[in-house]
Amino acid sequence: MQFRFLPGIFIALLSPSIVAQMNMPSGSSMDNMPSHHQTMDMNVDRPTTNLADNLLRHTTSGTDAEPDSTTPPMLMQMKGNWMLMLHGQGAIVEQQQTGPRAHDKFFSVNWFMPMAQRNFSRSELTLRAMLSLEPATISGRYYPELFQQGETAFGKPIIDGQHPHNLFMELAALYDIKISPQTLLNLYIAPVGDPSLGPVAFPHRASAGDNPLAPLGHHLEDSTHIAYEVVTTGVTIHKLRLEGSAFHGREPDENRWHIEVGGLDSWSGRLTVAPFKDLTGQYSIGHLHSPEQLHPQEDVLRQTASVAYHHAWPATTLDGLVLWGRNHTIGTPTNANGYLIEGQALLHSHQAVWTRIENVDRTTDLLGASAPPEETVIGRVQAYTGGYAYRFLHRSWGTADLGAQATLYDTPTSLRSLYGDHPTGVAAILKFQIGK
């Protein structure tokens, strides 16, 4: 199956009225909303009361689920029968590192998501795009991050660096049918999208909201958030949701400006549970056909499990995530595991503190040209990150934060000759966020 959707349809539909909303007084578009759209208002900018209503917001990529109490930042405006929305963020980063493999760089990570929703009597249609300018704002096809691996730059494996996201991170249509107040059927079709595999991807997680760097376990946990030719169906009943996806398993190539095709050759399934409004858990499994350009003969069986938490007090908001991801290279004994704990607190609406702790297997790809042809695990790295930011700008269109973070690495014995015992990384961060 191949898709030939035109990205311009999404952009032309969504952009003009959303930009106009930036200059409107706070609450004006909501106050004048027709009564038959009040349900959509509840779904998007306020805490929801059950999993079905939470999923109807569609404020993350794919069909991922946040805790029901989450209130994502968003700009909104009614245009006829359509609710138009926009959110996103961009960070300007100065990254510096220590150790024999250290590199420094000035770059920007960014994405923005325009979206349009329309309610019918018992259903909802959502058109959503997600775009990034990282192919232009990250030079050399990657930014430095010690011990990071995955994908290629100029035909060589990216070592100690993270690749940029594609211009088209997502182009999707979602159709939901509400059978009852707590029963939902959904269909998701995307030439570029996020199948039902893994938690909410790191660019969209509130627990990683001010941390601009990808987790070291990204390619064990949530790297399929940009996949091609994705078809997902699912059913939600009360506090449970079951989904299945078919998609193209190869990760994006180095041309970050285009949309790829290749056929439905991979699958995934995910079970999501939301026992309380502040808590969401998921387990997912997927078969990825030839995901890595450097190992085209290898298929991967990926499993992930995670628990996400969100709670808001009068002066503090707390978000957290516990995550496990595992890649098994089919036909070999190779298993690579990644474990992550991350959290972020917003204090008095203008100070943010965050942390990320990882324990991640690394493979022979880190050895570069001297790596053997068969990828195997050669060590486990620990990374400890802490950060702080001050929110110095509040406007009707969003916010701006200025902060910094530091990461300390614990190198496994097998890699100390290459990295030293405890290399470090520090980053100064200026972040802009659309929506409040």
Image (cartoon, grey):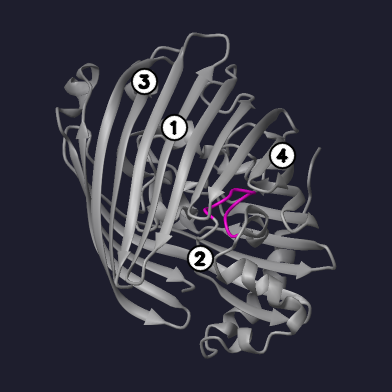
Q: Are marks 1 and 2 in contact (CB under 8 Å)?
A: no
**Where in the figure is residue 229, as x and y percent of width and height?**
72, 41
* Magenta span contains residue 420: no
Residue span colored magenta: 59-67
Which of the pair 124/82 is nearer the observer?
A: 124
Residue sitting at the far right: 121
* Residue 154 visible, this angle: no
Q: Amino acid at mark 4?
A: Val
Q: Which mark is residue 261?
A: 4
**Where in the figure is residue 336, as x and y percent of width and height?**
43, 21
* Disc number lying in front (3 or 4): 4
Identify the element where label 2 is drawn.
loop
Q: Assess disc 4: are there few (<14), some (14-19) or many (≥20) residues with their C-alpha within 10 Å of its C-alpha.
A: some
Looking at the image, tell me whether mark 2 or mark 3 is earlier in sequence order. 2
Q: Amino acid at mark 3?
A: Ala
- Answer with left or right where residue 159 lies relative to residue 184: left
- Answer with left or right where residue 376 lies relative to residue 243: left
